[in-house]
Amino acid sequence: LEVNTMPGMTALSLTPMAAKAAGMDFGQLLDRIIQITFNQTH
């Protein structure tokens, strides 16, 4: 997945589609984004 500061997050957007192709559901995608962000700021 590519880091994008303004990713589309609708069902038809590329970011959730790429996550699905990588085996992640939407909730897992959000959890991963939050986890990475938290680790980079703390």
Image (cartoon, grey):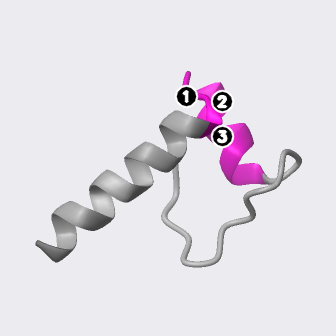
Among all residues in the image, which is located at the extreme left? Answer: 42
At horizontal 42% and vertical 55% (from top left) the residue drawn is 33
Q: Which mark lies nearer to you, 3 or 1?
A: 1
The residue indicated by pointer 1 is: 24
Please provide percent x and percent y for residue 31.
Answer: 42, 45
Q: Residue at x 56, y 22 (%)?
A: 23
Would you say the residues marked 1 and 2 are in contact, meaning their CB atoms lie under 8 Å apart? yes
SS under mark 3: helix
Q: How many other residues sit within 10 Å of disc 1, few (<14), some (14-19) or many (≥20)?
A: some
- The quarter in which the C terminus is drawn is bottom left
Tell me where the magenta segment starts and ends, as one range.
14-26
Q: What residue is shown with label 3?
A: 18
Report which residue position mark 2 lands on: 20
Q: Position of residue 20 (x, y in %)?
A: 66, 29
Distance between mark 3 and mark 2 Cα atoms: 5 Å
> Could you give the CA–CA distance between mark 1 and mark 2, rounded to whole angstroms?
5 Å
- Secondary structure under the numbered disc 2 in the rendered image: helix
Amino acid type, mark 1: Met
Under mark 3, the amino acid is Ala
Residue 40, placed above or below residue 15: below
Residue 1 lies in the magenta stretch: no
